[in-house]
Structures are given as structure tokens and as C-alpha cells.
């Protein structure tokens, strides 16, 4: 392993995947671990999507696909952007990829030169920072706390901008905090960006539909932002299709072209069967997935209620996604069952070892005071997990 490239040596392993691996290891030793570390809906995908996939197999959708995605799928995506976001993206502005993760990687590779700075309001999704570094960009974290509902203020944005700033990346609803930026908040950020026309925005909207306050707003729809925003989305979360690996962007044409060029040399077009299934998913009325959103909403309320009964957990009220991100820094310096807790990582490991519950340290998301708990799990598991957590604290 001495000869591993510096690129890969300098990369961190996905903390969410690492925690899942640790939980698996403990399970293989016979421990009954409740996994609340992964960002994965626990629903089966709706039958009409499965039917579309079966039909695609029978209709022999088995050849290489166009690098940027089937035209029929891009039409569905274009229709979805119009219907849900009020955005007009032509087919030449849309690129389908193997998951939103690849969409993000493509954009980083296409838009960044070595040394270009990318502003990441923290907490941010784990992979942003390593994807930016892989593209030789420099992540610039802007820490936010529970006081502002983990949202970056316009003043913070302005203070983080330097002559090297090239992009701003954020997700709303946010993984891990569940925070949702409203229209006025986005307008205020856009007002700052107006002064810096060379800065582009990656708006990761993969949790768009998992929103309990309604009214998702795309920053690309804010005055002056359309030509400088890359809107990223996918089907992993709202349609419970994590393993199908389809994500997509709507972007200025030159960026879409760059992504297609890159993808053409790396993965080629995304999986044919999955693409056909996603046409069915995106063309369907949103009422077909409402049951999942209602269920997440119920679980959010349950988890907030149960965690609220534990002394020392400070919680915001997440308006979307399926995570809570409690500030647990009040435990730092305490010794529990002979273990001294000095960091969020210590705390998450303590919960894993003593409460048999897998969570993720906030450090991985750029926030050292919090842990992330996913509530994409059954009500029974959530009740059990939180009871065990309460017990060991
Ligand atoms: N963006 C955010 C904020 C996510 O939480 C995730 C998945 O965890 C992704 C992107 C990647 O999604 P995909 O499964 O489409 O690659």
C-alpha cells in the first residue's frame, strides 16, 4: 500500500459507510445493533416503478445508453423540473448519472481548477469535501450552529468569499441537519452572490420531496441565479431507489456538456433498466410517494419527542430529510461507564458499544458538537434505540 497514490491516501473513508461496517462487525460477533447511521429509506420501492423495470428488461433495453441519458428520461426530468421547481431546462442542459454522487463528482471535475475554493456551509453532506479535494479544489467550511438552525447567513457567506472562491455547495433540505432554506433566505444569499458573478452554486435537492413544511424552493429559480446554478437531484431518497443509482443535473449547457464529456471517458451512460424505471417514477404524480413522506414526518415527531426527554441533547426541528442532528457537546468531559467522552466521535462510539445503536459523528459533516441519527428506520427500532440510548446516558 506504500505505492497508493497521494490522491487516495489523502482521501477520508466515508464515515457513514465506516460506521455501517463497524456495526456489521459487531453484529457478526452476535451483538444486536440497531443501525441508525445510514441515509437509506427503509421502504420498498412502489410497484409501478418495479413494473417499468421489468418491462424494460422484456423490451430489451440492454444496449449501451446515450452517455447523458435516454432522451425519454431527459424529457421526464425536464418535465419534473418544470412541474416541481418552475425551472426550464432543455434536454441539452440535463445529464443523467450513476447516482447524484456521480453528478456531484462530475460537476467538481468540470468546474474546478487546482486551488479553486468551494464554500461549504457546515454541517454538509460527508462526500462534498472529499469530492472537492479529489478535483484539487479547496473546501472552505463555514460553520453554523443550532442558533441559526444550521443555516448559513448572508453575512457569513460574504465573509467567506475570497478572490479564489469558485463555487458554493449546499443541500436543502440538508443532510445532516434537516434544515430547509426558505425563499427569503435564498434570496438573501443570492443578493450577496450578485456582487460576485464568477461564483457558481451547486444546489443539491435530493431531499426535495422529504419536506414537512412544504414549498421547496430551488435557488436556480431565484432572480439572477439560473445561469450560475447546477441543480442536482436524484431518485435515491424520495423514491427509495438507493441501489438503482440514478441521479441527474440541470445546468448551463456548457457545464452539462463538460459532464457528458467526462462521463463518456469514465462510466458511459447510466444503467439502462434503471433509467427506464426512473421515467415511470418521475412521470407519476407525487401523490404516489406521499405515504413515505407522511411516515417520515411521523417518525421525526416521535424521535424529537423521545430525544427531547434525554437531558443534554440540544435539538433543532428538522424541516426535511430524515435525520436529526442533536448537539451533544454537553457530554464532553464526562465519564460514563469508565469511558471519557471528549468528542462527538467518542460519543457515537460510546452509543455503539454500550447502547448497541449505530449513529454517525458530526465531525464527518464538519460539525464537532453533534451526531447524526437517521430515522429511516421502523418506529419499533426507533423506540428501542432511543430507550437504549437513554439508559446508558
Ligand atoms: N446528496 C446528498 C445530500 C445525500 O445525502 C446523498 C446520499 O446520501 C447523495 C447526494 C447521493 O445520492 P445518490 O444515491 O443519488 O448518489
Image (cartoon, grey):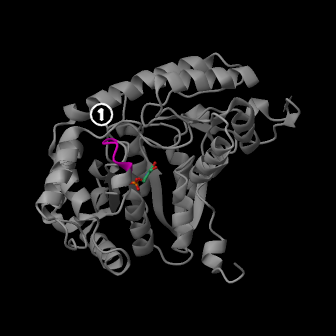
Beta carbon of the mark 1 residue lies under 8 A of ligand 1 = no
Residue with the mark numbered 1: 215
The answer to which quarter of the image holds residue 294 is top left
Dominant secondary-structure state across the stretch colored magenta: loop
Name the secondary structure under disc 1: loop
The image quarter containing residue 7 is bottom right
From the viewer's side, name the closer residue of 178 and 291: 291
Which quarter shows the N terminus? Answer: bottom right
Q: Report x, y in % for residue 343.
A: 77, 42
Look at the image and tell me whether residue 137 can be seen.
Answer: no
Residue visible at 22% across and 46% down in the picture: 50
Reply above or below: 34 against 137.
above
Image quadrant in which the C terminus is located: top right
Against 228, is 7 above or below? Answer: below
Q: Residue 62 versus residue 292: which sits nearer the camera? A: 62
Residue 8 percent location from the top left of the image: 61, 73
State which region is magenta. Answer: 238-242
Is residue 239 located in the magenta-colored stretch of the structure?
A: yes
Picture quadrant where residue 387 is located: top right
The residue lying at 33 percent from left, 31 percent from top is 292
Amino acid at each position: 500500500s506504500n505505492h497508493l497514490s497521494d490522491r487516495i491516501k489523502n482521501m477520508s473513508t466515508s464515515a457513514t459507510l465506516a460506521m455501517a461496517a463497524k456495526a456489521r462487525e459487531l453484529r457478526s460477533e452476535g451483538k444486536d445493533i440497531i443501525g441508525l447511521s445510514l441515509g437509506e429509506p427503509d421502504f420498498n420501492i412502489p410497484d409501478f416503478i418495479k413494473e417499468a423495470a421489468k418491462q424494460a428488461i422484456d423490451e430489451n433495453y440492454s444496449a449501451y445508453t446515450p452517455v447523458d441519458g435516454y432522451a425519454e428520461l431527459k424529457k421526464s426530468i425536464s418535465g419534473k423540473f418544470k412541474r416541481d421547481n418552475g425551472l426550464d431546462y432543455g434536454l441539452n442542459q440535463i445529464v443523467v448519472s450513476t447516482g447524484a454522487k456521480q453528478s456531484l463528482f462530475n460537476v467538481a471535475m468540470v468546474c474546478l481548477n487546482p486551488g479553486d475554493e468551494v464554500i461549504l456551509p457546515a454541517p454538509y453532506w460527508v462526500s462534498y469535501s472529499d469530492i472537492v479535494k479529489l478535483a484539487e479544489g479547496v473546501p472552505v467550511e463555514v460553520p453554523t450552529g443550532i442558533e441559526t438552525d444550521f443555516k448559513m447567513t448572508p453575512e457569513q457567506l460574504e465573509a467567506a468569499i475570497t478572490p479564489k472562491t469558485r463555487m458554493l455547495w449546499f443541500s436543502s433540505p440538508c443532510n445532516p441537519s434537516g434544515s430547509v432554506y426558505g425563499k427569503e433566505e435564498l434570496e438573501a444569499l443570492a443578493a450577496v452572490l450578485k456582487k460576485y458573478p464568477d461564483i457558481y452554486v451547486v444546489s443539491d435537492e435530493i431531499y426535495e420531496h422529504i419536506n414537512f413544511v412544504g414549498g421547496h424552493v430551488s435557488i436556480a429559480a431565484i432572480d439572477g441565479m439560473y445561469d450560475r446554478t447546477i441543480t442536482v437531484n436524484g431518485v435515491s431518497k424520495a423514491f427509495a431507489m438507493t441501489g438503482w443509482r440514478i441521479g441527474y443535473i440541470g445546468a448551463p449547457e456548457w457545464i452539462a456538456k463538460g459532464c457528458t464529456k467526462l462521463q463518456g471517458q469514465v462510466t458511459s451512460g447510466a444503467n439502462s433498466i434503471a433509467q427506464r424505471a426512473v421515467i415511470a417514477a418521475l412521470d407519476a404524480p407525487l401523490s404516489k410517494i406521499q405515504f413515505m413522506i407522511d411516515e417520515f414526518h411521523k417518525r421525526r415527531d416521535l424521535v424529537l419527542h423521545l430525544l427531547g426527554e434525554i437531558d443534554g441533547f440540544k435539538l433543532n426541528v428538522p424541516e426535511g430529510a430524515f435525520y436529526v442532528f442533536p448537539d451533544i457537546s454537553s457530554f464532553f468531559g464526562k465519564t460514563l461507564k469508565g469511558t471519557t467522552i471528549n468528542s462527538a466521535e467518542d460519543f457515537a462510539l460510546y452509543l455503539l458499544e454500550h447502547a448497541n445503536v449505530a449513529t454517525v459523528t458530526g465531525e464527518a459533516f464538519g460539525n464537532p458538537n453533534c451526531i447524526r441519527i437517521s430515522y429511516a428506520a421502523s418506529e419499533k427500532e426507533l423506540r428501542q434505540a432511543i430507550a437504549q440510548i437513554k439508559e446508558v446516558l
